[in-house]
Image: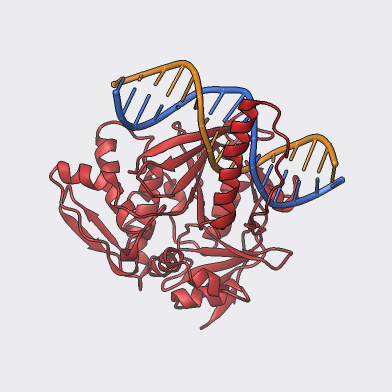
Chain colours: A red, B blue, C orange
Amino acid sequence: MEKKEMGVMSVKSEEDVGVGGGSSSLLNGFQFSSVFDFYEVEKSSSLGFMELLGVENYSSLLDVPQLSSTMSSMAHRQTTIMSSSDTNGKDCSEVLNQLPQTPNSCSISSASSEAVNDEQHNRTLVDQVQEDGEEEKQKTSKQLKTKKTNQKRQREPRFAFMTKSEVDHLEDGYRWRKYGQKAVKNSPFPRSYYRCTTVSCNVKKRVERSYTDPTIVVTTYEGQHIHPSPAMSRSAFAGVQIPPPTGALSGGFPATNFGSVLQENNYLLQYQQQQHHPHQQLLVNTLSSLSNPYNYNPFTQEKKLCNPGTTTSFLRDHGLLQDVVPSHMLKEDENFIYQYGSKVINKENNSTTLIHLEVDE
DNA sequence: CGGTTTTGACCCGCGC
DNA sequence: GCGCGGGTCAAAACCG
């Protein structure tokens, strides 16, 4: 495998790097530093990705089916994968949708971010119960504690992205129940917490608006759906035949399933856009168009296979990406990633839409 | 009336 | 140990 060093763009969370790191800029907890390392490969596989991630022990990454399959899928779609390892040597990876540098290539880079400590420690409860109400709370707390202690909570892979949208909660085809809202430090905009309403589906997502650019919504998905998108049935209800998931994506329904679900949601998007809701479904739009080897439109019954071996097929067929990415960014430029990152990150150009995917295991 | 949202309290990890 | 901030719970309010 041939590598070519070109430059890198790293993305870190705020707590990982602290506030105000050099020339980098913060976007509500995400820090974007300058380009410093970047690899270009001629051909790639999911394993090739891992090798390029520079991760010493990447077995954990490969153990995550949806992540592995996602990367494999992205390889076929020539998407840039970004990974990281922090100062403590812990690994995580981040994904940034990008256009390929050259034909037959995908771009991998290495960055940093701190892994989250998932250890659940026992807590000492107050021995004396002073009031009846207090006692009830203690009971509840104890039950919670036992539950959490027994089943060690492990963080699912997380995918974060930013979308320029007037709507905070972007429709993605799934049904969500809001279970919390918190004020975000240094931001006038709160962060909302959602859970998938489907029973036993533990997928969560956070939605917050960037304080540096209030037009940008930062959405973070965590977990994997164990069910198809309700949008599928809605599409079916509309008389649309949905093709089955293909390839490596058929195993499950990741929260940001880069395959089947979003692909199908894409149809809903198009329908909604027809229904004059242009500000919704941008995520679905983007991810679907970027990651699906198949671009199937049930409304036109058209099914395209984007050949992973050619850049032009992707460039010409932006899918719905062009809905959120200015056309001048969709060009076959060797420095695209750098320019892409610069525009979005440093210039705070209001006309620019940032699409960022973060895989945080 | 059932599902969803709101919101204050609580839990937990982490840094000092 | 304490405070802070992120994340979650759960009762009340809201809504179709």
Of residues A90 and A168, the one drawn nearer to the viewer in this rendering: A90
Answer with the quarter of the image where residue A316 lies. Answer: bottom left
Q: Position of residue A214 (x, y in %)?
A: 56, 32
Name of the residue lying farthest toward the bottom: A1
Q: Can residue A275 be seen in the rendering of this structure? A: yes
Q: Going 41% across and 70% down the picture, which residue do you hit?
A: A72
A162 left or right of A186 in image:
left
Q: Where is residue A230 in the image (x, y as percent from the top left)?
A: 28, 44
Of residues A304 and A170, the one drawn nearer to the viewer in this rendering: A170
Q: Considering only vertical position in the picture, is A291 above or below A13?
A: below
Name of the residue lying farthest toward the left: A239
Count of numbered marks: 0
Answer with the quarter of the image where residue A246 lies. Answer: bottom left
Q: Going 53% across and 82% down the picture, which residue do you hit?
A: A2
- Quarter of the image with the C terminus of chain A is bottom right
Q: Can residue A24 be seen in the rendering of this structure? A: no
Of residues A234 and A320, the one drawn nearer to the viewer in this rendering: A234
Q: Considering only vertical position in the picture, is A32 above or below A78?
A: above
A272 left or right of A225 in image:
left
Q: Going 49% across and 77% down the picture, which residue do you hit?
A: A48
Q: Where is residue A68 in the image (x, y as percent from the top left)?
A: 45, 69
Q: Considering only vertical position in the picture, is A285 above or below A41?
A: above
Q: Going 63% across and 32% down the picture, which residue do you hit?
A: A135
Q: Considering only vertical position in the picture, is A10 above or below A171?
A: below
Q: Where is residue A266 in the image (x, y as percent from the top left)?
A: 30, 48
